[in-house]
Image (cartoon, grey):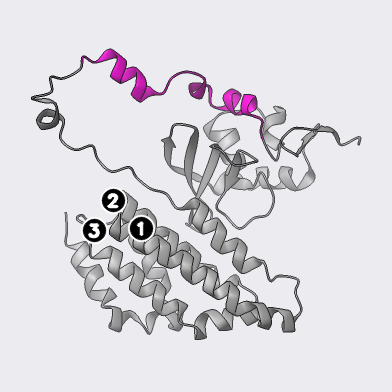
Amino acid sequence: MSFFTEMRPNGHPYLKKAPADVLLRQSRRSSCELEERKELDDRDEFVVTGSEGDDYVVTIGGDSKTRVGCSCPDKVVPCKHISFVYLDVLQLDKTNPLVWQTAFTPKEVLKLLPRLASSSPNDKKRAASPEPSPSTSKKARGAPPPPTRVYAARITEAIEAMHSLEGETPEEQEEQSPEVMSEVSEIIKGIEQDAINSPSSDATRSNAISAIVTIATQFKEAPLELREFLYRGGCPSQVVHAIANILVRCEKKLDDKVLSKIEELESPEEFSSHYDEAGLEEKLMENREKE
């Protein structure tokens, strides 16, 4: 028990010093960049671009057991993306014990995100503004914009499902691969349907496309038996069609970073062979012409 004190209510130990694998990830964070920060009611979400240009979502707060997480496939917490948020975005000192903990208590979350201790910014705005008259309120304000959705949890689910077969024997991988492939397929379908059917903004559609591409790029990292099932089972076709279906509903040109991520799928033939049937190239050209 020299490395940590007692177990805390959230089931995680309080680490007295930083483990070597966390220190290593801190040293590798220099390639990270902050793309976006979203302040939500009970948590903050940080979209962080990694060394390969992929975007990952770091979450601090919320109702998960650990109250901290990242959508990247790294099993170590904090990973380099979380370490980047701690040290470079929140400007915590390397000697602050919070920067190497694997989970937070509610009080620790408030230390990291002091704004959560007070009422939300939206509450303050409503309190400071006079109530509009019933006859003019809807016309003056119009319908509120739909919230921007992020799919960090779905990305994590898909990646964890694909990596769940690591360490299994080839026979076990072959036996379990159909079930895992079905789970990944359902996650992709859920993201697509959410972006298409729910009232959503272009920002949400862009996040949905990025999430699907991120999941697809993990196919090549999956255990061999699962990878073959994914390719034979039609997941590449599903990915390309899902992107095309969401893309056609985008009202404005996608961010160049998202467009370049889509283009990354052209290199594996398993994906590019479905471009024509999905009309993806044509839809990409149409989107580039939008303002």
Query: In the rendered view, would you say 258 is above or below 283?
Result: above
Q: In this rendering, is residue 114 above or below 59?
A: above
Mark whose residue sits in front, 2 or 3: 2
- Measuring 35% from the left and 69% from the top, which residue is drawn there? 242
Report if the CB atoms under discs 1 and 2 are less than 8 Å apart.
yes
| Residue 272: quadrant of the picture | bottom left
Which residue in the structure is indicated by mark 3?
A: 250
Local crowd size for mark 1, using a 10 Å CA cut-off: few (<14), some (14–19), many (≥20): some
Q: Which comes sooner in the sequence, label 1 or label 2? A: 1
- The residue indicated by pointer 1 is 194
Residue 121 rendering spot, x and y as whole percentages:
37, 23
- Which comes sooner in the sequence, label 1 or label 3? 1
Q: Are marks 2 and 3 in contact (CB under 8 Å)?
A: no
Residue at mark 2: 200
What amino acid does circle 2 point to?
Answer: Ser
Is residue 120 in the magenta section?
Answer: yes
Q: Distance between the residues labelled 1 and 2?
A: 8 Å
Q: Quadrant of the C terminus?
A: bottom left
Q: Farthest residue in the front direction?
A: 134
* Helix, strand or loop at mark 1: helix
Q: Residue at x 75, y 48 (%)?
A: 21
- The span picked out in magenta is 104-130
The vertical placement of 129 against 274, above or below, is above
Q: Distance between the residues labelled 1 and 3?
A: 14 Å
Q: Position of residue 51 (x, y in %)?
A: 54, 54
Q: Residue furthest right?
A: 2
Q: Where is residue 67 in the image (x, y as percent from the top left)?
A: 61, 38
x, y (%) of residue 25? 67, 47
